[in-house]
Image: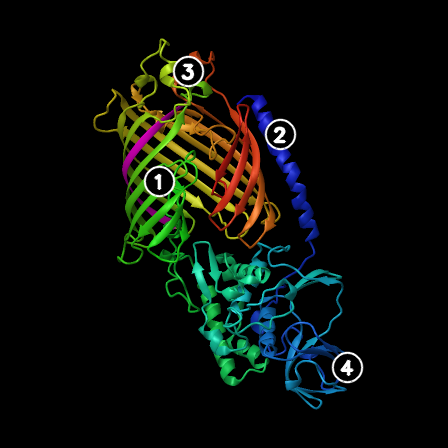
Amino acid sequence: MPQGCVRSFGRACLALLAFLLPLSAFAQQADRLAVIWQDRGDVSALDLVGGPGGAAHEPGNEFTFLEESRGGTSPKFDVRDEHGIRWRVKLGEEVKSETAATRLLWAAGYLVDEVYYRPQIRVQGLPRLDRGREFVSGDTVTDVRLERERDKGPSTTWSWYKNPFVGTREFNGLRVMMALVNNWDLKDVNNRASETAGGARYEITDLGATFGRTGHVITRSKSVSKDYAETRFIDKVTPTSVDFVLQSRPFFPLAVHVPNYRARTRMEGIVKGIAIADARWIGNRLGQLSASQISDAFRASGFSPADVEAYTQTVMQRIAALKALDPRPPDSTADARPNPDASDPSATGADGIRCLESTCRQVPVRETLTAIDVKTPHVRAIVGGFEQGAGIGGGVQLTSASAIPGLELRAAALTSTQLYRRFDVGVFVPSVGSRRNHADVWFSYVERDTDFFGIGPRTTRDLQTEFATLRRSFQGSLYRDFADNVQGGLYAQVMQTQSARGEDASVASIDESFSSAPVEPLARWIPGFRSNTRILSYGGFLAYDTHDNSIGLTRGANLYGRLASADGVGRHDASANYGWLEGEFDVRGYAPLGSPRMSLLMRARGLFKTPRGEDSQIPFYDLSWLGGRTSLRGYHSYRFRANNVVLVSTELQRTVRSMTSVRGVDVFGFADAGQVWGDARSSTDQAILDNQDLPWHWHSGLGGGLQYRHSRSVAVRIAVGRSHEQTITYWSMTRGF
């Protein structure tokens, strides 16, 4: 690689890092002293009767009225006891649920207020209250929650969507706790960040809207054990994350109040997309509590013996469900009961299950057709389906789902904004002798156009020619999940390809460019051009995948390797002997820089194809290629072709607006470099064309863009790439490489 290219690529990467890394360092320094969780030590020894304040901080017996509070939905007023401690008295339906929820969150390690329940208290000097008079008889007040006032510095509210802990295990555990207690009122005003000598304390100060049914204003409830027991806990589980049930969206006619409707709808996302490891972590913490301790929390909150028993059973079921979480098909739902198969290691075939979610395939070509839920198991809306240069692709997939035991039939019809066509029909077998073994057999029909510039690293843009291909192929794969993140297998494919000149007459013609040149026939110089080939290929692959899109920007790693052999079979329209060996590696890393709001993406890819002998050839459309949105941005798609290709890409992403734990808007900058080499024609015929005699040449591109992440798999992305040849704008619906 020439030193000048190395220096240019290095400077580009350093400039991007120098621009955005200080922002991450500043954020880490600012959040250094913030606390949201504390280790309680031996959870099994905690006193849930006394709760966070314990018996030592219990309120006295003689209270004097101070003032009434008119904020919030529940009646409240302040009193002082005989020890001089100030307490806030709360009345109404939230009293018992808030007391119990506070104790469970405290036991899990979260920062909460010190609260106590009293069936009744007597208050001296009690005036006629504006609210809550139904709980008052003379100087006696019934069913009260007492919250101890403590010394605290300046405080403010904090947001579920933007805080120093987003993406951390402790914050995700808090999100799980909100689902566990059915808290349907997750407004920012109920969260408090207080400055203390030890740093900022992040707390939830209002847990009253709990232990009932979530829903809109007509269906939701508080402190109703029957409603709590009847609601589902876990909504959906994917191989990496879990969605919990929280219904907070207002009744549809109330959508006229747009800000409230949007806020309540957005609130449902707080308990979705939580990493399974984090959910299991908080489940294991809670699992140290005994049934007696959980009962103490509800008994100390004033619930009846029947309610205490009902709540204890439901909470224990939910804890068991957290501890039993394991990857399962994403269209499955679960209630609070533990999954009896979750402990079976053979049930954790992660990638086999991912294919149910996004119809992913590792071979012969790695691709993911992202599936969008349309509320029926037999139909999937699909995004993708074509390599770069086809525009935005998508369509519909019909599936038998679980109607046929042991296998799933699939049929897909896809098109793109360039009006290319693809049809797939196949059978997926999720379990072959073991739940870790899977099989996939399918037929594909693809029609599309693409561009060809010649062979070699120094081809000129003047030779750009559009050609059309029609491909029919049969393929099958058998693969195994060796571990939760490791998969490998074998595959075979027979592909028949017809090529012809494309319909775009505005680009130059290779036929015209060579019409007067003393070169060999095009069929030899460009093997497979305007011909019909049939290629049998077979090989194996190994993949290690820990990448995770469940929180913010992507994190983790994705490593892939493949070895294969390809041979021409049957008769061909052109006299050619097709045959080659190939190897591929693709290494991708996603490294958060301080928080889920900034990430460095790195990729190295190589594809190497070696003809079997001197008379063996590789069809031009099967050569390795470089250039375009997924391979060397700043150049036209498929700009360079040869036997071998190496690509190095970096991308620095920064979230500028977080909407939910998954949804957000990011800016990014990138730098790519790569080269092709290895075809004899690139140093002979092609060298003659551009008056060069050196076959090796690196190309690089720089740029940046904006992306809107809508879900864990779908994003709208615009990127602008600049190379020494041109500036190109790319649109896509992916989250990058």
Residue at x 40%, y 65% (from the top left corner) = 339
Disc 3 crowd rating (10 Å Cα; few below 14, some 14-19, many 20+) is many
Q: What amino acid is found at the position of numbered circle 4 in the picture?
A: His
Percent x, y of residue 245: 48, 64
Q: Residue furthest left?
A: 570
Q: First in sequence, mark 4 or 3: give its number.
A: 4
Mark 1 element type: loop
Task: Say whether disc 3 or disc 2 marks the residue closer to the N-terminus.
Answer: 2
Residue plotted at (46% across, 54% down): 240
| Residue highlighted by disc 4 | 83
Query: Count of labels shown?
Result: 4
Residues drawn in magenta: 465-482
Rendered view: 642 above or below 560:
above
Task: Determine contact: label 1, label 3, CB under 8 Å.
Answer: no
Considering the whole magenta stretch, tell me its main secondary structure.
strand
Label at residue 686: 3
Residue occupying image coordinates x 56% and y 57%: 169
Marks 2 and 1 in Cβ contact (< 8 Å): no
The answer to whether residue 67 is above or below residue 571 is below
Q: Earlier in the sequence, mark 1 or mark 3?
A: 1
Cα distance, mark 4 to mark 3?
94 Å
Residue at disc 2, secondary structure = helix
Residue 325 seen in render: no
Q: Amino acid at mark 2?
A: Arg
Mark nearer the viewer, 1 or 3: 3
Reading the image, the residue beneath label 1 is: 363
Comes first in the chain, label 4 or label 1: 4
